[in-house]
């Protein structure tokens, strides 16, 4: 049985920067990260954390869940805000930073 590498958010972001980098990541290969790449990743983590805090403050009082698998059936029972949701199938595994339900629930 052959197991293929799933296309992830990291691979999609790599593809936008460099098609070769994405191809190597799909093969499971990686190089050494530069100091800039390490710094940039830490900045992104800080920005995501600040954005999450602001999002929760902006929607105070609404239900929030983390690490939710995004499926069709979740639409009816989902919380108002999903943080770090994940859509996954046989070929794709994509993390979504946040999903906010529309204010009109009718």
Image (cartoon, rainbow, N blue to C red):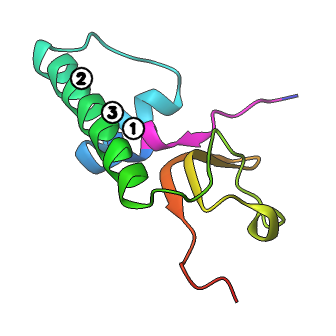
Q: Earlier in the sequence, mark 2 or mark 1?
A: 1
Instruction: Read off the residue under disc 2.
Output: 42
Left or right, 71 with reference to 27: right
Task: Count the labels in the image.
Answer: 3
30 up-or-down from 5: above or below? above
Residue sitting at the far bottom: 106
Q: Secondary structure at mark 3?
A: helix
Residue 6, given in percent of the width and then of the height, sits at 63, 39
Tag in front: 2 or 3: 2
Task: Read off the magenta span.
Answer: 2-11
Instruction: Read off the residue under disc 3.
Output: 21
Q: Report if residue 65 lies within the magenta region.
A: no
Q: Residues within 10 Å of mark 3 (few under 14, many from 20)?
A: some
Residue drawn 80% across the image and 63% down it: 77
User: Which residue is more in the foreground, 6 or 68?
Assistant: 68
Q: Residues within 10 Å of mark 2 (few under 14, many from 20)?
A: few
Separation (CA) of disc 2 from disc 1: 21 Å
User: Which residue is more in the foreground, 92 or 100?
Assistant: 100
Left or right, 96 with reference to 54: right
Residue drawn 73% across the image and 60% down it: 78
- Classify the position of the C terminus by image quarter: bottom right
Q: Report if residue 6 lies within the magenta region.
A: yes
Mark linked to residue 6: none
Left or right, 24 with reference to 90: left
- Classify the position of the N terminus by image quarter: top right
Residue drawn 44% across the image and 61% down it: 59
Separation (CA) of disc 3 from disc 1: 4 Å
Tag in front: 2 or 1: 2
Residue 99, given in percent of the width and then of the height, sits at 53, 60
Instruction: Read off the residue under disc 1.
Output: 22
Residue drawn 79% across the image and 67% down it: 72
């Amino acid at each position: 049985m052959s197991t293929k590498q799933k296309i992830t958010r990291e691979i999609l972001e790599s593809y936008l920067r460099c098609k070769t980098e994405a191809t190597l990541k799909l093969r499971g290969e990686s190089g050494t990260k530069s100091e800039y790449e390490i710094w940039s990743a830490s900045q992104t983590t800080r920005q995501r954390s600040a954005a999450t805090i602001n999002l929760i403050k902006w929607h105070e009082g609404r239900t929030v869940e983390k690490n939710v698998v995004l499926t069709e059936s979740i639409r009816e029972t989902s919380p108002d805000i999903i943080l770090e949701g994940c859509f996954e199938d046989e070929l794709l595994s994509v993390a979504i930073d946040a999903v906010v339900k529309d204010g009109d629930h009718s």
